Image: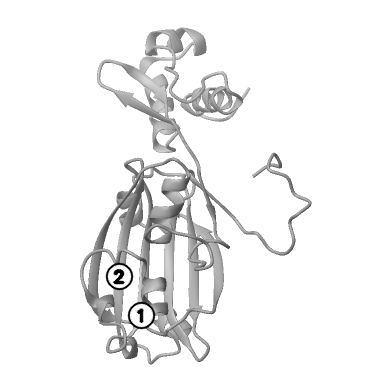
Amino acid sequence: MSKQPKYHQVADALRRDIVGGAYPPGARLPSENDLQAQFEASRNTVRAGLKLLASEGLISSSQGLGYEVRKHEVFELNASRFENLTFPQNGDSYNTDVTNAGRRPHQTFRVEMTPTPDYIAERLKVDKGSTSVLRFCHRFVDDVPWSTQATHYPDWLISKAPRLTEPGDIAEGTTRYMAGLGIEQIGYYDEIATRMPTPDEARLLEIGAGVPVLLWTRTGYSSERPIRCTVTTFRGDLNRMNYEIGDLSARNEDDPK
């Protein structure tokens, strides 16, 4: 006999059915009464199991309509093309990539002068606590929270690229804007990590317990020094990243993405 609490057994069985495709995205789960009969469990036990699945982001409830499997349309980001100025773009990279995928982009901005966090200062090679321009974006794909992006620019850039301090979007993207001023990003260094979200991240990205975030830190370099450090925080359940490196002529369009 299983030593797990009964509600965990209910959740585990339903999770297997969801992952296995018995209940595809958008499908309604059986009613609480039907689940009580199926699992020979009390209403409170069934509700506790459903609540656990809801906290994991697998199902959602609607008043009077029961529970349904959440639709998780994963967005695929080609990180090696992102911000690559040799590829044609209509606006910044985020808008271009989301639109080209047939999805709808939306983002909000916050711009401020702020003390540079230690881990950012280390990457920008500036003094800890020195001032940097923070451009913070809250990004959505089809009205679903997709990521937050915090980019710090060192204060020596302000006089050379004053639009970095302006609130709101820079239509052509900051990388293209700076390149037009002769501050060209010629390389970048990426770091990728995962962890559980902070309370603020969980709130902004609307993720429940059990769903991790993917942290993508990209430090951009001119020919002389670092010019920006960007930390993008993605919902772990709705995003996938890939890179293209080297000659991929042997790869065909039908290969797994």
Marker disc for residue 175: none
Instruction: Please say if the residues under marks 1 and 2 sit with CB atoms less than 8 Å apart.
Output: yes
The residue lying at 30 percent from left, 16 percent from top is 65
Marker disc for residue 135: 2
Amino acid under disc 2:
Arg
The residue lying at 25 percent from left, 62 percent from top is 109
Left of 168 or right of it: where is 177?
right
In the image, residue 23 sits, relative to residue 131, either above or below, namely above
Mark 1 residue element: strand
In the image, residue 222 sits, relative to residue 2, either above or below, namely below
User: Number of numbered discs present?
Assistant: 2
Quote the CA–CA distance across marks 1 and 2.
8 Å
In the image, residue 242 sits, relative to residue 220, either above or below, namely above
- At which x and y percent is residue 203? 30, 50
The residue lying at 32 percent from left, 41 percent from top is 143
Q: Name the residue under label 1.
A: 153
Left of 194 or right of it: where is 94?
left
Q: Quadrant of residue 50?
A: top left
Residue farthest to the right?
A: 250
Q: Which of 176 and 27 is in front in this view?
A: 176
Q: Considering the image in quadrants, where does the C terminus appear? A: top right
Q: Considering the image in quadrants, where does the N terminus appear? A: top right
Amino acid under disc 1:
Tyr
